[in-house]
Amino acid sequence: MSISIDRSKCVGCGACVEVCPGNLLVLENKCARIRDVRDCWGCTACVKACRRQAIAYYLAADLGGAGTKLYALDEKRTLTWRLEFPDGSQQSIVVDKTQSNQY
Amino acid sequence: MFAAIRLAETHPELSILIVEKANIVRSGCLAAGVNALNAYITDGHTPDDYVEYALNDANGIARRDLLSTMSERLNAVTRKIESLGLVILKDADGNYIARGARNIKINGENIKPLLAAAVKSFSNVEVLNHVNVVDLMLNGSTVIGAWGFDVREPTIYRLRAKATLMATGGAAGLYRPNHPGFSRHVMWYCPFNTGAGYAMGIRAGAEMTTFEMRFIALRCKDTIAPTGTLAQGAGAAQINARGERYQHRYGNTTSERLHAVVSENLNGRGPCALETIGITVEQEKALEHAYLNMAPAQTLKWLETKMPPSIANVEIEGSEPYVVGGHTASGYWIDRKRRTTLRGLYAAGDVAGSCPQKYVTGAFAEGEIAAESIAEYVAAHDLLPLDRFNAVEEVERLFGNPRGLYSTDELEEAMQQSMDEYAGGIRSNYRYTDAQLQTATAHIDRLERLSEGLRAESMYDLLKIYELRERLTVCRVLIEHLKARRETRWHCFAEHADYPDRDPTFDCFINSRLVDGKVEIILRRLEDDGIEEH
Ligand SMILES: Cc1cc2nc3c(=O)[nH]c(=O)nc-3n(C[C@H](O)[C@H](O)[C@H](O)COP(=O)(O)OP(=O)(O)OC[C@H]3O[C@@H](n4cnc5c(N)ncnc54)[C@H](O)[C@@H]3O)c2cc1C
Ligand code: SF4
Ligand code: SF4
């Protein structure tokens, strides 16, 4: 698991840098960078913090990953996860924050 | 955070400081969220039932007094976190819905932001984010605070306090992980919890207990996502490659469930999996949601491979070993007030020992107990002066070291490899012998010496060096504990190949203390409950 940052979408707001539990993200020339992708735990804190959807989370090749990117849009009542498959197709899953897990 | 909230609510006259290496909004174990409250007294059960369950799961090596003082508070802290905004599943009458005998179902994705918001609402709580604490500060053997440094700015903090609560979690990254390459940090326990709190206590001479009862998580293969949601939530049983349900042959304690998988694999009946084929579409959707709320990798894997749990069973594997007092019983030796053996120092959560199966609500309960004890203590004690403060020289030395042959990363990898090969890692199916442990000690000694010469060029480098050194200290003590328990009390968690059976001689706690640089082992009776009056 790791993350990839799209530098063209990043506006350098620093929200992701603030929340990473491993202090792995830094701002460099007003753009976020991960110090070492191998150190990412995959907690998705940065993915949820990025209002610009500039950070995607993906399964690394050694974990069986096949190139799909996962984005999150964190809003007051909902957390919307968006999967972008390698063929360009997309799927969204909306989680209502006021509802408990059924399991 | 829970301890700070308790103290702030009940003692507005006190000033409280939380020091956090990351940011309390998303730090530590629960950065991604929490999937259920694993420690709760459900209808028809009592706190005593919980105590008996935890004692049985630990094969007797846990403290009844600690378990009971924790269990009595589990439901009250649950109500408290619900009042702070945690969503808990309820029936039409407003009762919590159980997931198994001791768990309740929640939506815990935002548990950390909720706690952080509560902390911020108190004017007598200050938070120092991105400050990594390195060591305790002492007056004799009384703890009078700690020092740390900003991981982003060249600033060292000398933080003096009448009382200090250690809540730095357990230790991950000691052993070679399941995926040592690109995904080296894809592990169950938080890779940024490096055992700092254990190491600080060890160096200051605090007594530690039961490090040898390692925790090894049984997890979904590759993603290392929790299995409880599938096993307890969706009722999926473990099966081997022949489709046989084998669990009944091994027992059902936490270590036995892992042992079952290891044994089935060794006997050529692997891989093992959770039997999910045939679950309904509704169940599958609910699982996708549940995993997004705590381990999104699993949902991603199901959706991108187009192998959802209804058509493919979910393969499982054991993680590398961790030292973590919230699941097993490793940590500070404390009394029921959560006082450590060092005056002025308290411990709660994964860093505190002898109180296994505490999970998040148990950590809250211990935080509350510690907060109440701290309030009593600070009312009766003055702040003592500091003996000496060498931190600046120490940090300057690390910045001044010449560039050497080895990097921090290399030494960390060498440590993980040595622990894996010689101290019962994944490679040896978690087993070890006396001869191997001796070799492990030699490697850890060598790496500790080499770590002295590491050079920092930034505050982040400094963080990495201290994290490595904390882990090496924890490894050293862990190996001595593994040597000292000359029996096999728990499969996998402490499987001594020279002593494959349980031995009643070891119906005792194995404790330790660092004396003149050496780990001294102390055997304590199971009835022992604590610490002489401070
Ligand atoms: C992936 C995962 C999932 C879990 N899921 C569940 C679940 O579903 N249900 C459940 O009941 N329990 C669950 N647990 C267990 C539960 O999270 C822990 O028992 C609980 O969080 C322990 O609390 P703690 O305060 O001891 O540790 P943590 O919550 O990890 O807090 C320790 C804090 O100390 C900080 N820190 C560490 N070192 C330093 C230092 N040197 N200086 C400054 N700060 C430092 C860390 O950044 C961290 O914020 C889970 C654990 C993990 C790892
Ligand atoms: S996923 Fe988590 S660990 Fe990885 S970079 Fe983002 S915040 Fe940090
Ligand atoms: S949160 Fe997003 S936009 Fe802001 S710095 Fe990080 S990547 Fe860039």
Image (cartoon, grey):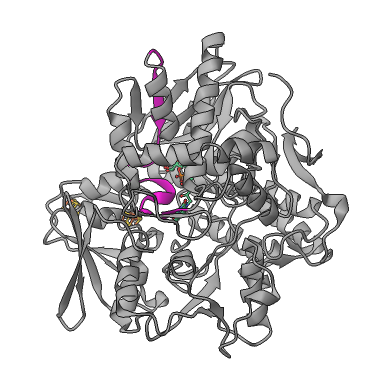
The residue depicted at 40 percent of the width and 59 percent of the height is A39
Residue B125 horizontal/vertical position (percent): 35, 24
Residue B251 horizontal/vertical position (percent): 68, 69
Residue A41 horizontal/vertical position (percent): 39, 59
Query: On the picture, is B194 further left or further right than B55?
Result: left
Residue B181 shows in this picture: yes
- Residue at far front of view: B93
Residue B24 is covered by the magenta coloring = yes
Q: Quadrant of residue B230?
A: bottom left
- Residue at far bottom of view: B242
Q: Name the residue nearer the viewer: B384 or B87.
A: B87
- Residue at far right of view: B505
Query: On the picture, is B401 further left or further right than B461?
Result: right
Please identify the quadrant where the C terminus of chain B is shown. Answer: top right
Residue B168 shows in this picture: no
The residue depicted at 39 percent of the width and 29 percent of the height is B5
Q: Name the residue nearer the viewer: B34 or B284.
A: B284
Give, as a single range, the part of the protein colored magenta: B13-37
Q: Quadrant of residue B312?
A: bottom left
Instruction: Indicate whether B46 appears above or below B11.
Output: below
Q: Quadrant of residue B489?
A: bottom right
The residue depicted at 65 percent of the width and 62 percent of the height is B253
Residue B277 is covered by the magenta coloring = no
